[in-house]
Image (spheres, grey):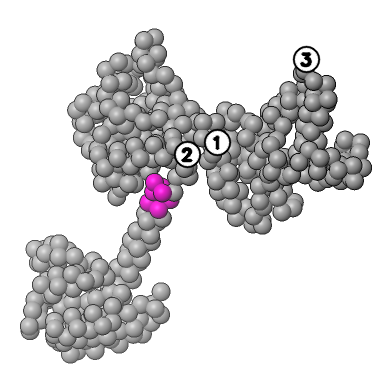
Amino acid sequence: MPDSMRILAVDDDASVRQLIERFLGQEGYQVSVTTTGQEFLEAAQRLAPDLCIFDLDLPDIDGLSLLGKFREFSEAPAIMLTGSDAAATAVAAMRAGASDYLTKPLSDWRKLGVAVKNALTISRQSKELQGLRAVVRDTYRFEAIIGASPRMVEAKDTARRLAASDATVMIRGESGVGKELFARAIHFGGSRAKGAFVDVNCAALTESLLESEIFGHEKGAFTGAVGRRIGKFEQADGGTIFLDEIGDMPLSTQAKLLRVLQERSFQRVGGAEKVTVNVRVLSATNQPLEKAVADGKFRQDLYYRINTVTMEIPPLRDRREDMVSLSVHFIEAAARREKRPIPALSAAARQVMMQHSWPGNIRELENAMIRAVVLCEGLEIEPSMLPPQIRAASSGAAEAALAIPAGGNLLQSVESLERRMILDALDKNGWVKARAARALGLTERILYYKMDTYGIAKDATPPS
């Protein structure tokens, strides 16, 4: 780290400047020194240092004021040096934005080396954290949500407007449609983006564990509680908590959640102290909560509390026009993870996929594309590489299409059946005509002739 780090120091004492330059130079840093505040500001703007060392008492300006001017154009860490060890001086330096505070004379210069190293390490970690937050914000921005179908455009528009508010939101949709993705986009697109996004799966834990998970517990609250645990609500203070599958939350926990929403405070399990939080609540469910309320399985008062604003995420079968773009996204991601060439999705595979109902929605599609990438040995993903249940839907549709209709013109029925059989054979054999011909018991020449007669091309209407 030192080889690339530039340090700028300002001190009116020539002996201190000389020692700083020599000691930190020996440690491997690039060190520049100045005598006055004005010299320092000019050098800082020119050199853009990674860390600065300030003397508190300068001839033209005090160190705290100088640090304030420096902070107008730089966030680099700063270490304050002074001849006073008064606590008030130290507090003032830290409030002004100093990373550390050392008193002169420095009898042990190693302390300065440690302070410089620690300040640079914290600064680097802070920059890395900011970078990670920027990546997360970019990952969950609304523009990154794939979908141009009318219902998805409507859902994204609704979520974008909700991000600008602090309202409690209920996100509805089947399992696997991307409810958590929308919840994260709402969080990172709003004023709480710098706060934490904390998610809780209400269906994954038992009643006692869920309560401890959400509200935390005190030491000795139950067997195994060997220390205090901070719950999800406290972790989300200043940010957002996402309660996934809230319809599965036990009634006793629902009562405590209602109290948090009303009073913005709660008690940890086994504790008496009230904990106050400032948290936005987003929730999601794949259940009809109205029926759960009618059946006495969900509190009506809580239902109205969490249902301030509702938005619906459409299932994949209702947005088939998004299927190809989603598939390509998952294929590219899987290929990068597997360190494989990125295969294309063949027209035959697309036709098979369009006939599947996708009960598992986006999650099912992603798993199907991962499987296909792993099994693909060529340049294209063919139907044979898709999961059996997806191929089965296509086969069932093809068999229904191949059924001979009752009555009607015999010649037309035979031609229609022959055309569908050829299309089905081509589809099942990835449009490799030699294999399709063998499956039909024809020569390639006759297959080409019949394809030309019936106007069959690779983009022809599939059997349906």
Residue type at mark 2 is Ser
Where is mark 2, residue-wise? 149
Which mark is first along the chain, 3 or 2?
2
Q: CA distance from mark 3 to mark 1?
A: 32 Å
Secondary structure beneath dot 2 equals loop
Q: Depth check: 196 or 441 in front?
A: 441
Please tell me which residue is depicted at 18% across the width and 80% down the height of the picture: 41
Q: Is residue 299 left or right of residue 102?
A: right
Crowd rating for badge 1 (residues with CA inside 10 Å; few <14, some 14–19, many 20+): some
Q: Depth check: 218 or 336 in front?
A: 336
Q: Quadrant of the C terminus?
A: top right
Percent coordinates x, y for residue 447 in the rendering: 86, 41
Query: Are the two marked residues, 1 and 2, in contact with CB atoms closer than 8 angstroms?
Result: yes
Q: Main secondary structure of the magenta part?
A: helix
Secondary structure beneath dot 3 equals loop
Percent coordinates x, y for residue 32 in the rendering: 27, 85
Q: Is residue 79 left or right of residue 291?
A: left
- Residue 137 among magenta residues: yes
Where is mark 3, residue-wise? 406
- The span picked out in magenta is 136-143
Q: CA distance from mark 1 to mark 2?
A: 8 Å
Which mark is first along the chain, 2 or 1?
2
Crowd rating for badge 3 (residues with CA inside 10 Å; few <14, some 14–19, many 20+): few
Crowd rating for badge 2 (residues with CA inside 10 Å; few <14, some 14–19, many 20+): some
